[in-house]
Image: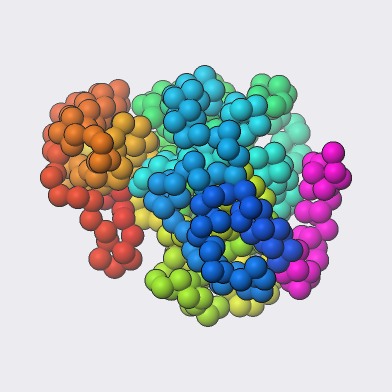
Amino acid sequence: MKLSNTLIWTLADSLVTAHSTSQHIGAVQHRRLTDLVRHARTSSPFYRHHYQGVSQNIENIAQLPSVDKATLMGSFDDWVADPEVRLKDLKMNFLNDLDRVGDLYLGRYMVMTTSGTTGEPAILLQDDQSWKVINVMGRTRPQAIVTRINLVQLARRGMRTAALFATGGHYGAAAITERVRRVSPLIAERTRVISVLRPINEIVAELNSFTPTLISGYPSIISLLAEEQRAGRLRIEPLHILCAGELLTPFARHEINKVFNCPLTEGYAATEVPALAMQCTENRFHVNADWYVLEAVDENHRPVPMGVESATVLVTNLANRVQPIIRYDLGDRVTLLPDKCSCGSALPSLFVEGRTNEVLRLEGTDEQQVSILPLALGSVIEETPGVHRFQVVGHNPREISIRLDVEAEFEKPRVEHEVSKRVKEYFDSLGVSAVKIIQDPAPPAQDHGSGKLRQVIGG
Ligand SMILES: [Zn+2]
């Protein structure tokens, strides 16, 4: 095995790069990009075709045409750089089998699907190098976690991690946690994946008995836990909270801080670029630019100046060869910050402007209000065969409507019926049984302001 393929090398390289100059990081990034593009051109039929007419000499990443999820998913078998990977087989023999969450497809690829905020689900494979980078970045770069956490308390009370994500599928964060559990029995013993699809009182009871010292989860569930803690039903004392998957609003951050009184760190990533950026002690996101490229661009994919909010971002994953992600439209609005961050990191920093799904407040039994998490509801709908895109609109605590785009080979009325049935079952499990679910024949509508599709809009 080449030295550059080992975990130790990835770890040492990450530590050296984190303390180097922006020029050095730029040079590393360019070298890796050149290698990745060469690989994509030779091993991915999709990119070979997509890059026809593009110079062999890539001086600037903007020479390459961008890609989006719909195009790549539509050419899945041509997109992947391993001819043994076939979408049909992957779906039938792997994704449909929930016992295989966190397992390796073909004995060599970690598999994750997107959920919730992104509309059409994507299926992403990570090869060995990409998995090493996810692990190493997760351990070496989030300086905010290492410096903020009370390590004496952690040593005294013991590490017990509660990971609160949507389960029941191969979703990003849950699949990564399950993979880590499979690789390390020690971590498996001390890590519990708790599904946010369960009723909140069950989640609270499990947390009260598990007494986690570390918590990770979507901001919407963490906010709900803060409400439960304030009401006295939840009684935990976490030493650190990591939020991921959705954007934390300043109000929610303030509330969580007030109730739990422990450090809170946000990740900014996506299943396509799993270790894209991490928050520093100054609350900025730093892009791990040695392994990921992030371009802030306007709606025509031209770069926007530093300090100006972008229309979207294009991301490139330099670590993953099996399924090249090169100038991929992620859809988030960000502002790249021109000045050097006072935390000392030479990695580029940014603010994220947001993903804008909302928590639905619905009426439960005994007229109690039940909060429905957008990512949880999204995963219930997206798991239904035939759903291409969806949007849920909450009109009032007793009525919601669902808009669906259905895949061409499916009959819309059947898919609508199945979605209504699944959502009703999910609501029933939460004690929300009097809510009327309407199928709106209109397609999901984009937000007038941002142009983004909001999957869940509160009433
Ligand atoms: Zn910083």
Q: Give how far across and how far down residue 361 sits, in percent.
A: 26, 41
Q: Nearer the viewer, residue 33 or 111?
A: 33
Q: Which residues are magenta?
A: 1-29
Q: Is residue 203 magenta?
A: no
Magenta highlight: main SS: helix
Residue located at (67% from left, 44% from top): 130
Placement of 408 over or under 453, stated as above or below? above
**Could you tell me if residue 58 is visible in this image?**
yes
Residue located at (45% from left, 71% from top): 301
Q: Give how far across and how far down residue 360 sits, in percent.
A: 28, 43
Q: Nearer the viewer, residue 91 or 395?
A: 91
Residue located at (19% from left, 50% from top): 443
| Residue 200 falls in image quadrant | top left
Q: Nearer the viewer, residue 108 or 188?
A: 108
**Could you tell me if residue 200 is visible in this image?**
no
| Residue 295 falls in image quadrant | bottom right
**What kind of colouring is applied to the model shown?**
rainbow
Residue located at (15% from left, 49% from top): 442
Q: Is residue 19 magenta?
A: yes
Q: Give how far across and how far down residue 73 sits, in percent.
A: 43, 46
Taking 216 as reference, is 145 left or right? right
Q: Give how far across and how far down residue 3 sits, in percent.
A: 86, 45
Q: Which quadrant would the N terminus be assigned to in this image? A: top right
For ligand 1, which image quadrant applies? bottom right
Callout count: 0
